[in-house]
Image (spheres, helix red, strand yellow):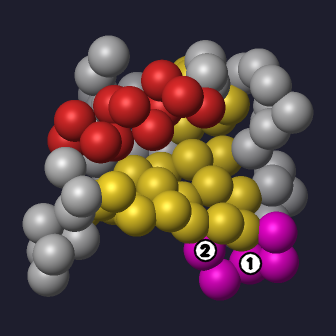
């Protein structure tokens, strides 16, 4: 599964349907922050926003696999 970095997406299924997601690279650690928030709030600083950190690209893929999220990513064009 290709998970884009820095591109916003929407969760299409699960109890988090409608939440927005963005994966940000962490330059300091080399890991990744997975930030998701309720539709209507905006980004990590917003009420209802959550973030998780994973160490590697493999961990990132496993995170999304375990979450079972079906994603719709914004176009990069």
**Residue at x 65% of width, y 83% of height:** 45
The percent position of residue 26, horizontal first and vertical second, equals 23, 71
User: Is residue 74 visible in the rendered structure shown here?
Assistant: no
Residue 6 image offset from top left, x and y in percent: 33, 52
Estimate the x, y position of residue 31 in percent, counting from the top left. Answer: 22, 62
Question: How would you rate the neighbour count of disc 2 (Cα within 10 Å): few for under 14, some for 14-19, many for 20 or more?
Answer: some
Q: Which residue is mark 2?
A: 44
Q: Which residues are magenta?
A: 43-48
Q: Is residue 53 magenta?
A: no
Q: Nearer the viewer, residue 41 or 34?
A: 34
Disc assigned to residue 46? 1
Identify the element where label 1 is drawn: loop
Give the quarter of the figure containing the N terminus.
top left
* Nearer the observer, 12 or 53: 53
Q: Is residue 58 above or below residue 29?
A: above
Residue drawn at (62%, 25%) of the image: 69
Numbered badge on residue 76: none
Q: CA distance from mark 1 to mark 2?
A: 5 Å
When asked about the image quadrant of residue 4, the answer is top left
Within-10-Å neighbours for mark 1: few <14, some 14–19, many 20+: few
**Relative to 28, is 20 on the left or the right?**
right
Q: Position of residue 29 (x, y in %)?
A: 15, 75
In the image, is 10 to the left or to the right of 26? right
Whether tag 1 and tag 2 are in contact, CB under 8 A, the answer is yes
Pick the residue in front: 53 or 45: 53
Q: What secondary structure is marked by label 2?
A: loop
Left or right, 63 with reference to 14: left
Quadrant location, the C terminus: top left
**Is 76 situated left or right of 58 in this image?**
right
């Amino acid at each position: 599964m290709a998970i884009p970095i820095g591109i916003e997406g929407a969760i299409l299924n699960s109890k988090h349907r409608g939440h927005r997601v963005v994966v940000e690279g962490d330059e300091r650690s080399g890991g990744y922050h997975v930030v998701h928030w309720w539709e209507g709030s905006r980004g990590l600083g917003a009420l209802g926003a959550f973030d998780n950190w994973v160490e590697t690209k493999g961990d990132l893929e496993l995170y999304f696999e375990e979450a079972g999220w079906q994603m719709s990513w914004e176009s990069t064009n």
